[in-house]
Image (tube, rainbow, N blue to C red):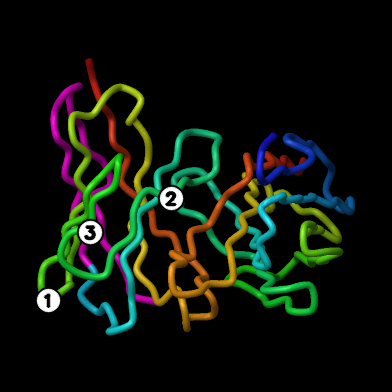
Amino acid sequence: LAKTTQPISMDSYEGQEVNITCSHNNIATNDYITWYQQFPSQGPRFIIQGYKTKVTNEVASLFIPADRKSSTLSLPRVSLSDTAVYYCLVGDPIYNQGGKLIFGQGTELSVKP
Amino acid sequence: DADVTQTPRNRITKTGKRIMLECSQTKGHDRMYWYRQDPGLGLRLIYYSFDVKDINKGEISDGYSVSRQAQAKFSLSLESAIPNQTALYFCATSDAGGPKSSYEQYFGPGTRLTVT
């Protein structure tokens, strides 16, 4: 699985857009990029997944440049409830032993009023 | 009701004791996983199972064993608990894939285990 690098922590204010970038220089052809959110004392929760270009769902957008060596999770207009740890994972969910996930240290996002 | 449940939610045990953590799911998924999380660290995979007859070791399986009693149940055992196994343990499930699958994992609420 590709190694990922994310900022350890980020601060933001309510109503702002937050962008968290993840570096994955050795991403493989079959690898997908997936983001999870974790609140204290809870299990991680899937946010979004993508392979290339841009993916958007009801809670976030994921931007992936053409070389796929990095990706950016974008959270529009964050609120206090978005304070959590965000994990970037890169791997082949199909052939890489069925989606076994390797979590890094994640980015701790703190949203202030 | 929650799709993935874990029992117990909290447990304090003594060094050398055998302990079992249980996980049940109602999502109908074939794949189940056990992770542990230590303060300030991400999750690390202990064991995973792709179906009832398929069990595989993860990154940190030493000191742990598992049992897949049915599609819906996956148990983690610590044969002889030691203090450095104090952690938050998560069970997760995912489907077996397909053209529209994202292999999203669904996590349980966690079991906080303390070994004294």
**Disc 3 residue crowd, few under 14, some 14–19, many 20+, Cα 10 Å:** many
Q: Earlier in the sequence, mark 1 or mark 2?
A: 2
Towards the viewer: A96 or B72: B72
Q: Are dots 1 and 3 on a single chain?
A: yes
Which of the 4 image quadrants contains residue A28?
bottom left
Residue range (magenta): A1-23
> Which residue appears at 23% of the width and 57% of the height?
A55
Q: Which mark is residue A22?
A: 3
Q: Which mark is residue A46?
A: 2
Q: Nearer the viewer, mark 2 or mark 3?
A: 2
User: Does A22 appear in magenta?
Assistant: yes
Horizontal and vertical percent for residue A67? 12, 76
Subunit ID for the residue under disc 3: A
User: Does B85 appear in magenta?
Assistant: no
In this figure, which residue is indicated by the disc labeled 1? A67
Q: Are dots 2 and 3 on a single chain?
A: yes
Three-letter code for the amino acid on which mark 2 is drawn:
Phe
Please tell me whether residue B10 is drawn above or below residue B45 in the rendered image.
above
